[in-house]
Image: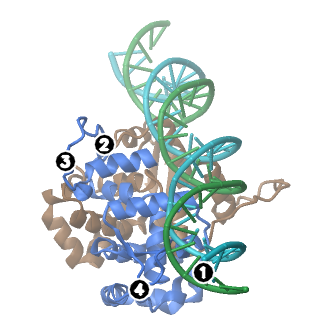
Chain colours: A blue, B brown, C green, D cyan
Amino acid sequence: MQVIFDILLAACKVSTMTPMKRPAKKPKADYRSHCPVNFAVESLGDRWALLIVRDMVFHGKKTYGEFLKAEEGIATNILASRLDFLERIGVIKKSPHGEDQRKDIYTLTEKGLDLIPVLFEFIKWSAKHDPLSSAVHYPQFVKQLKANRGKFNKKMRDLVRSGSSLYTNVIHP
Amino acid sequence: MQVIFDILLAACKVSTMTPMKRPAKKPKADYRSHCPVNFAVESLGDRWALLIVRDMVFHGKKTYGEFLKAEEGIATNILASRLDFLERIGVIKKSPHGEDQRKDIYTLTEKGLDLIPVLFEFIKWSAKHDPLSSAVHYPQFVKQLKANRGKFNKKMRDLVRSGSSLYTNVIHP
DNA sequence: CTGATCACTTGCAATATGCAAGTGATCTTT
DNA sequence: AAAGATCACTTGCATATTGCAAGTGATCAG
């Protein structure tokens, strides 16, 4: 995946800081296609990226150590590589922690916040089709998701942007 | 992935046909969690699953050979394993081709059709954030997606269910 | 009957994942 | 101020997945 990540990053202009010397060889690969479905799949289609975003949106997680505690049990090296990738494609942003210099604070960019509706659709689909879904514990949330999608999106977005996460215990307590 | 697939399938009750003998050992693993975000990620979070669904929804593809022609270039063995997995988790259904016995027809189940809104959100996100997105070629479609999401969903759903795919050349020509 | 087509399968090399054990920098405690 | 804990990673290695290329057997078309 690391190789794929690097190739995608080369294709994506996001990380272009125009260094002194351009690499002699241009990156040989690119996105497999620029079909919008494929773009999202190549950006987010693995077993961890959206879980990290989920933890930021619903749990208000912000540091490496917090992400590491995810119920699904991500390995330290995988987490590091995913955070790095998400930062480089511009979904999250890393900034120094004010009080503890060992830590960094990861926050969602606007591009990252734009994934909230994607999370919502994932949740709706799973709530309907996973017979064991923990979504049964918060039917109100799911109902609201269906009825007031747009409103919910804005609310959540503002909340997360403000550094908070009101629904922390709703989706994945 | 095959191992993961098998484990997930064991956890998912979909494929339980109660064979004569249950395996002595119960499958040791399960979904990593039943968080709805994670359920969707584990079902669809790889580099191919949603592209196959895309090809069914937007291109009206129905046979192995058609899927194989996807622009992204899926390998024959990977395609076979993904079709098998998608069928086993109940997203697609395999049935014999009427006229050519070498072929089978793959169609979306209701569970599969329920992924259309997920595709829509992927498209919206990519249209906004991929500077090279081919979505620039059909701004009307994207605009409609934002404005009349629910209506669009129903339309598309009926279309696909009827075996057709009106927008075949819109998303990924 | 012969050769093409179709939907796969198999073997193998290249990648990616995940576990466990570091490592160095920064707290925190004594 | 020294010693130990904590934090965010990195490294090495075994295992799992991916993808290429070359089959294979069952239809189909001529």
Of the pair B69 and B72, the residue shown nearer to us? B72
Q: Which residue is mark 4?
A: A145
Residue A20: mark: 3
**Which chain letter matches label 4?**
A
The secondary element bearing badge 3 is classed as loop
- Location of residue B73 with respect to C29 vertically, above or below: above
Amino acid marked by disc 1:
Ser
Identify the residue position indicated by label 2 in the image: B71
For label 1, the residue is A134
Image coordinates for residue A143, horizontal then vertical, percent: 45, 89
Q: What element does badge 4 sit on?
A: helix
Q: Amino acid at mark 4?
A: Leu
Residue at mark 3 to residue at mark 1: CA–CA distance: 51 Å
Q: Given the image, what chain letter belongs to the residue carrying mark 3?
A: A
Label 1 resides on the chain identified as: A
Q: Which of the two labelled residues, at mark 3 and mark 1, occupies the earlier sequence position?
A: 3
Q: Are marks 1 and 2 on the same chain?
A: no
